[in-house]
């Protein structure tokens, strides 16, 4: 044990690369039991071991990755666990002896292939017994160390470490694998994983498989935040796999791996190698790079934060946020969720708008307090099936503090990042006037919770949520208020809370926006957040009169009313013309428009978008 740890301190060991990749290249199908080849075709395994040793590997791993009771049972070989594992070690020992090199042999232990409690039916003690059976055979056959690798479940790897420590006195490397979001399949992030593996008693903390070298370098640095004095083992895949002509291909070449071997060493790796998709050429390149490049070690600042991802790769801003930041005049279109199960018409409308050039689709949440499909579901459908980014309307009304936070987590989990915070319509005007209408937060309070809480990785109580969210948050603005000073005061509260952009109520007079923003500038300086002017296209004189006389906050100039009235049956066409003319006048102060189609006239909106974009 001590000798192995001292060796890791003296040099960066080079482990071998993939076994399965090499066997598959020799024509062995993935439906075969690779581990059984230790007995049925030992020459093929020996040849691969030999190639890795000749490439410069200081350590080779036995062909026993799946040689446990559960996985062998799928091939009817559950009674051959000891035999196959012993054969794997003895085969590796013969190859090492013939090489006349001092090469270490690691007994390979992979995942059991079953889910253990509390997320599966296999009890922890059953899993530990299965691991112990395999590890005992590897140790008794003469392995120099045990490598537990490619585990994606913290519960499982902890049982494997316990089994190793109770069964033998060999050094134990415990290596876990991550998904593309730098988390395990059960959502554990790298810093928490490193801490748990170290606490479980592993002698070396490992990360393998996952994505390519870039991801594992990032994860290695994160792990060292909480275990700066630990030993680390890194074996990445040769990039993310893709299927080409029926074959699994990996993009990262040998030279690329050589460059990253040096980076791994500098970041604190004590052993490096390759996982899926790597070959003896990759290992040779890593060995050469390490031997010929001067040693340089990066100083990693330690952190007391154990279960947050504050050092994780920062998620990029939404496309909507990037467009606004770049100064693009953006077009948002509001859509109402369907009142039943079918979303076909909505998706057809969203597709039309996307093709016309809409930058984002805004999905209202129970507009006019009417029962409709969940806005989250609609946003998810639109993003997945149409391919256009959405903005989720998120009312505070009807949600207590618990539900608000749970809904925010759910929204983020399904990929929604643009949030428009509103108070929401009172239930008294809708389908269920007796329904609960309470709320714990006003819009400015919810904006603060999101921007100063969730986006910092904390909930309302200051407790970590594990990973910061990345919401781009909008708020409502009335450019034609009865009390302009009160509206400006409300606007300031939203800005201080952290609002990123503003959507206004419908306007029909471009000067209204100029007047309001000029008044705001006198009091507080120029408004820095983007403002998207609300646009509600007129369809007919009847529609225009209703809005003008019955909807609070909407005033339609006499000239516009006369043009719509004169148009007769061509009212919708004139409505489009009025909008296009107005948009040209508001471009001086607005960052975009927020169109609210009436009567599902998405064709009108498409005409507006195309005309404005010319």
Image (cartoon, helix red, strand yellow):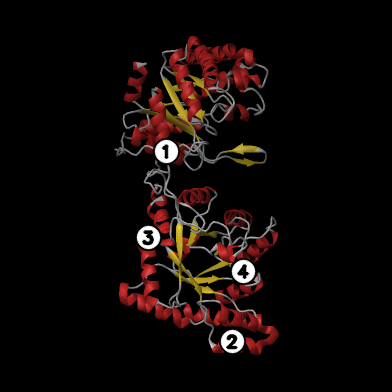
The residue at which mark 1 appears reads as: 219
Cα gap from disc 4 to disc 1, whole angstroms:
42 Å
Q: Nearer the viewer, mark 1 or mark 3?
A: 3
Q: Farthest residue in the front direction?
A: 434
Q: Which mark is residue 497?
A: 3
Is 197 on the left or on the right of 606, as rendered? left
Q: Position of residue 100 (x, y in %)?
A: 44, 14
**Residue 502 appears anywhere in the view:** yes
Choose the circle earlier in sequence order: 3 or 4. Answer: 4
Q: Are marks 4 and 1 in contact (CB under 8 Å)?
A: no
Q: Which mark is residue 356?
A: 4
| Residue occupying the point 53% across, 29% down | 118
| Residue occupying the point 56% across, 60% down | 365
SS at mark 4 in the image: helix
Quarter placement of the N terminus? top left
Q: Nearer the viewer, mark 2 or mark 4?
A: 2
The residue at which mark 2 appears reads as: 561
Choose the circle earlier in sequence order: 2 or 4. Answer: 4
Cα gap from disc 2 to disc 1, whole angstroms:
62 Å
Q: Position of residue 306 (x, y in %)?
A: 37, 37
> In the image shown, does 597 or 67 lie closer to the viewer?
597
Which class describes the residues within 10 Å of circle 4: few (<14), some (14-19), or many (20+)?
A: some
* Residue 603 drawn above or below residue 91: below
SS at mark 2 in the image: helix
């Amino acid at each position: 044990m001590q000798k192995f740890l001292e060796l890791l301190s003296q040099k960066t060991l080079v482990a071998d690369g993939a076994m399965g990749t090499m066997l598959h290249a020799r024509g062995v199908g993935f439906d075969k039991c690779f581990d059984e080849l230790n007995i049925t075709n030992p020459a093929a395994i020996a040849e691969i071991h030999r190639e890795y040793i000749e490439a410069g590997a200081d350590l080779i791993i036995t062909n026993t990755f799946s040689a446990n009771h559960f996985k062998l049972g799928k091939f009817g070989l559950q009674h051959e666990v000891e035999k196959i594992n012993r054969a794997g070690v003895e085969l590796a020992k013969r190859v090492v002896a013939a090489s006349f090199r001092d090469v270490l042999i690691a007994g390979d232990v992979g995942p059991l292939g079953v889910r253990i409690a509390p997320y599966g039916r296999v009890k922890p003690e059953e899993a530990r017994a299965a691991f112990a059976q395999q590890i005992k055979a590897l140790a008794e056959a003469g392995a120099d160390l045990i490598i537990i690798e490619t585990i994606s479940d913290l519960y499982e790897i902890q049982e494997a470490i316990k089994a190793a420590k109770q069964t033998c006195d060999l050094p134990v490397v415990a290596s876990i694998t991550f998904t593309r979001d730098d988390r395990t399949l059960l959502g554990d992030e790298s810093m928490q994983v490193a801490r748990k593996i170290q606490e479980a008693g592993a002698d070396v903390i490992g990360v393998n498989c996952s994505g390519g070298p870039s991801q594992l370098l990032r994860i290695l640095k994160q792990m060292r935040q909480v275990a700066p004095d630990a030993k680390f083992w890194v074996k990445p895949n040769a990039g993310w796999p893709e299927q080409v002509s029926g074959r699994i291909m990996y993009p990262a070449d040998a030279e690329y791996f050589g460059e990253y071997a040096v980076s791994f060493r500098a970041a604190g790796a004590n052993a490096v190698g390759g996982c899926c998709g790597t070959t003896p050429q990759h290992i040779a390149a890593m060995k050469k790079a390490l031997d010929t490049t001067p040693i340089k070690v990066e100083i990693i600042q330690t952190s007391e934060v154990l279960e947050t991802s504050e050092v994780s790769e920062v998620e990029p801003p939404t496309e909507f946020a990037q467009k606004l930041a770049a100064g693009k005049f953006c077009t948002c279109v509001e859509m109402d969720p369907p009142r039943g199960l079918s979303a076909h018409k909505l998706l057809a409308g969203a597709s039309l708008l996307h093709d016309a050039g809409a930058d984002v689709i805004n999905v209202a949440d129970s507009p006019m307090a009417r029962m409709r499909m969940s806005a989250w579901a609609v946003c998810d459908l639109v993003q997945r099936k149409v391919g256009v980014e959405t903005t989720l309307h998120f009312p505070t009304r009807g949600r207590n503090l618990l539900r608000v936070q749970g809904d925010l987590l759910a929204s983020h989990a399904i990929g929604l990042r643009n949030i428009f915070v509103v108070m929401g319509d009172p239930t008294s005007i809708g389908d269920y006037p007796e329904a609960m209408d309470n709320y714990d937060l006003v819009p400015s309070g919810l904006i603060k919770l999101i921007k100063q809480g969730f986006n910092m990785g904390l909930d309302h109580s200051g407790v970590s949520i594990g990973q910061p969210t990345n919401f781009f948050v909008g708020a409502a603005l009335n450019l034609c208020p009865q009390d302009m000073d009160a509206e400006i005061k409300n606007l300031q509260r939203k800005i201080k809370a952290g609002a990123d952009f503003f959507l206004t109520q419908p306007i029909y007079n471009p000067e209204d926006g100029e007047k309001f923003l000029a008044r705001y500038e006198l009091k507080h300086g120029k408004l820095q957040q983007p403002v998207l002017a609300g646009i509600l296209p007129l369809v007919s004189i009847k529609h225009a009169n209703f809005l003008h006389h019955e909807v609070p906050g909407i005033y339609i100039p006499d000239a516009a009313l006369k043009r719509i009235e004169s148009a007769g049956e061509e009212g919708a066409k004139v409505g489009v013309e009025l909008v296009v003319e107005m948009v040209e006048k508001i471009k001086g102060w607005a960052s975009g428009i927020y169109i609210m189609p009436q009567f599902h006239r998405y064709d009108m909106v498409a005409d507006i978008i195309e005309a404005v974009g010319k």
